[in-house]
Amino acid sequence: MNGEWSLKELYSGYDDPRFAEDMAKLDELCARFADLAERPEGEPREIVRSFILLSEEIEALNINLGSYAGLRQAADTSDAESVSVMGRLMAKNSSLAAPDAKLRRYVASLDSLETVIASDPLLEEYSYLLKNIREDDRYMLDPGAEEIISKYSISGSAAWGDMQQYLTSTVEVDFGGEKTNLSDIRNKAYDPDPEVRKSAYEAELKCYEKIKDAVAFSLNSIKLEVLNRCRLKGYASPLDEALHNARMEKRTLDALMEAIDEYLPVFHGYMRAKARLLGHEGGLPWYDLFAPLGGSDRSFTAAEAGDFLTERFAGFDGELSAMVRRAFDEEWIDFYPRAGKAGGAFCSGIYTVKQSRILTNFDGSLSDVVTLAHELGHAFHNHNLYGNRIMNTDYSMPVAETASTFNETLIMKTVIKEEKDPVKRRALIESRLMDACQVICDIYSRYLFETAVFESRDEEFMFPDRLCSIMLDCQKKAYGDGLDENFMHPYMWLCKSHYYSGELSFYNFPYAFGGLLANGLYEKYEKDGAAFVPLYKKFLRATAVMSVEDAGRVAGTELTDPDFWRMSLEGFKRETEEFIALCS
Ligand SMILES: [Zn+2]
């Protein structure tokens, strides 16, 4: 195998006659869609049906055309033809925005919406989507005002966000007599040499001095814009808006945070044990949070990774294992790094052919195999959604990483079970706890920080010193005595891009939610065994047609109850105890 993915299921090339036909068809459908929005005449049921059916056809074409060009572009970022096709598709789709908004408003304004939905099996299948359109409309201003808000945000929050990104990606960092950049210096936190980790941390903190004032203006401005927009639109707070967009209830977030709060000392205990192992007294200095403790030196070919994953997943579910086999055998995966190929890893579902495509930069390490397991989890989520209608395949952010993290957990737990060498075993458990500590302690500190900034912003402009002091307070609450007080990270507000979006506030709790949900489901699987598996698959399918709470109920879990989150955290507690025992 050459290790590249196959796209012939979509088109044989840009000269494939079907490609030109589909592009032309998309234009025709866009025109019909605009026409419907202009003249929604006749019975409401017929208009809503036409809206749905046209949207479905447009979506299917967009998936075929967009997947083909987008995937070709990811595999070769210098593919000029793909770049231009993507641009043409974007232009076609942006012409849909105004008619789409009109039709949504039409749906939302129907007093008889419930009756209309109940009168038609197709519309009943889309009941969740249609009701969400109505819910979202409660926070929409008149179209003129919406347009002003969106235009002004381009030179407002979006520009302030670009500035943070520009400054953090171009700031020069002095390190060892040379100049480097922020992402390189932050990566040195994983360096095996303790001296490198410490001096990189010092160099990192120092470079923020050069850009902290500008970035503080950026943060203050974005947060004020969000506060004002939320007030205009009728949200009780930015958190209220974030929860609405996540289709999640406040009491679910409260239950999650209550349980995290109770279990923080478990993670502090883990950090202190890691600190002792590295020769520190008391808590762990920030620069050693990611210190590697050795671990697996296993190496895999792509084919071996395929056999390994197929076999291990078979212990959980035949359907998952069979899908993984297909992914390897039917060329769903683009494995190896190449010049011009996109970095990192992702999975993209192609509903129209009921398959997924996965891009990785596979180098043969165990962590690359775990990355594959992660992306195959997304593919399995897609696989379960292919039974739904085409527009019932989107899910909200908090559940987006459940299947991927669940797969990672399955594989890591198996690898840990199979590892007999106590030092390697300790390192493997530690790598899980290190991740968990980020998802729990660090995310908790970010949630506290963002809450504090929103609470203060109306009253005060926060200069860098003030932001640093809020950040340190939040880190003390979240990391407790797990961290060494003399080596914390006052500038975490500056380097994390998540705070710098006008559209997406509180881009932190979904990580804690997703990580603990996946672990909680794994704990449930440990307890209930095979009986859990069909519920898990039903849950994945439900994530696109229900709120997160209702989807949780499909899996037999109550996410508004802190006990579910406690069960998840108990799993990490047992791993922490094993880690501490292996340390002595
Ligand atoms: Zn993912």
Image: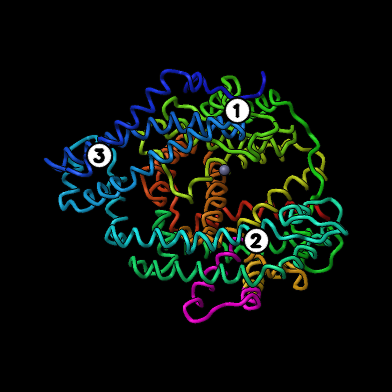
Q: Nearer the viewer, residue 198 or 522?
A: 198
List x then y, in percent, for residue 236: 37, 69
Disc 3 residue type?
Answer: Phe
- The numbered disc on residue 51 is 3
Q: Which residue sits at x=71%, y=69%?
A: 210
List x then y, in percent, for residue 194: 86, 57
Disc 1 residue type?
Answer: Ile
The residue mark sitting in front, 3 or 2, is 2
Q: Check disc 1 and report the residue beneath it.
A: 333
Q: Which residue sits at x=74%, y=45%?
A: 428
Judged left or right of residue 240, residue 491 is right
Disc 2 residue type?
Answer: Leu
Q: Secondary structure at mark 3?
A: helix
In the rendered image, the residue lying farthest to the left is: 42
Q: Image quadrant of residue 6?
A: top right
The residue mark sitting in front, 1 or 2, is 2
Q: Check disc 2 and report the residue beneath it.
A: 167
List x then y, in percent, for residue 538: 42, 37
Q: Against 214, is 562 above or below? A: above
List x then y, in percent, for residue 545: 36, 43
Q: Which residue sits at x=74%, y=58%?
A: 289
Tell me, yes or no, if residue 308 can be seen here.
yes
